[in-house]
Amino acid sequence: MRPLKICPSILAADFSKLGEDVRAVMNAGADIVHVDVMDGHFVPNISFGPAVMGSIRHVTDKPFDVHLMISPVDAYLGEFAKQGADIISAHIEAGPHPHRTLQAIRALGKKAGAVLNPGTPASALAPMLDLLDLVLVMSVNPGFGGQSFIPSALDKLREVREMTRGRDIDIEVDGGVTAGNAGDIAAAGANWLVAGSSVFKGGPQSYRANIEAIRNAAAGGRGESV
C-alpha cells in the first residue's frame, strides 16, 4: 500500500502572508505543498504564476506538487521546474499532445502527472501509463476552491487504482476533500489527498488538528491505525 500523503492546496492560504502560512501548515504535519495554477482561460479563475511559487520555495524542504490548470501548458513547464517544482501535473486536455507533455516534464528531471477532469474517462490514461508518476483525479470541476465533492469520483478512483496496480504511480484526489469523506476516498484508492479550505479553516492554530482529522479518517478508510 502506497504511503498516505496530505497535500494542502495553498490556493486556500492567506495570500497576504503566503510564505508564513505555507511554513505554518507544513510544520503542522502536512506532507506536500499543492500548488494550483490557474490561467483564466483553461479554467475560469486566475491564481498565480511561477515567480510567486518560486518566492515561497525556500520556506520548506517538502515537495512542491504543481497542478497546472493552464493551456497551452508546454511553454511553462520549464519555468515551473526552474522555480522549484518537484511534481508537475497537466490536464489531458491542456495541449494537443499529452504524451509529449509528460515526456517534457520527465526530461526536466521532474515527476510527471496527468489530471482527469470529472468529464474525462480513466481510459484516457491508457496510452501514457509508462510515463506517469502520478494520476490526479479531480473531484470537482477545476477553477474554484471550496466546491463540494462529486461522488462519482470514487468510481473513477477505483478504475484508476485497477489500471495502475503494480506500477509505481501515486493516486491523488483534489476537490471537496474533508475529514467526513477522506475515509471513502482513501478506500477507493487515493493515497494523496489535496485539501484546501478544510485544512486552512480556523487559521494557523487549527492547522494541525485539521490535518490530523483528515489523515486519521483516510487511514481508517484504508484499514490502518495512526
Image (cartoon, helix red, strand yellow):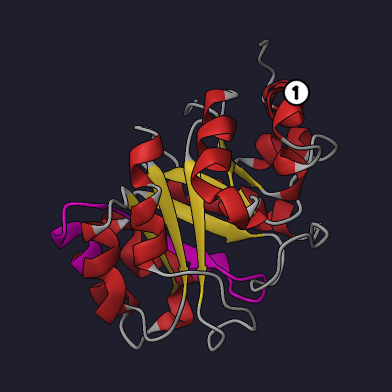
Residue 83 at x, y percent in the picture:
27, 57
Residue denoted by label 1:
209
- In this rendering, the count of numbered labels is 1
Comparing 207 with 152, the one in front is 207
Residue 139 at x, y percent in the picture:
70, 60
Q: Is residue 83 above or below residue 179?
A: below
Q: Residue at x 57, y 31 (%)?
A: 24
Q: Tell which residue pokes out farthest to the front in this image.
A: 16
Q: Is residue 173 magenta?
A: no
Q: Locate residue 15: give its quadrant.
A: bottom right
Q: Secondary structure at mark 1?
A: helix
Q: Residue at x 78, y 59 (%)?
A: 146
Confirm whether residue 68 shows in the render: yes
Comparing 226 with 34, the one in front is 34
**In the image, is 42 to the left or to the right of 150?**
left
Q: Is residue 105 above or below residue 188?
A: below
Comparing 224 with 195, the one in front is 195
Q: Residue at x 31, y 47 (%)?
A: 86
In the rendered image, which quarter contains the C terminus? Answer: top right
**In the image, is 43 to the left or to the right of 184?**
left
Q: Locate residue 49: give its quadrant.
A: bottom left
Q: Residue at x 64, y 50 (%)?
A: 13
Q: Is residue 107 magenta?
A: yes
Residue 2 at x, y percent in the picture:
47, 29
Task: Identify residue type, mark 1.
Answer: Ala
Confirm whether residue 210 shows in the render: no
- First to last magenta residue range: 104-123
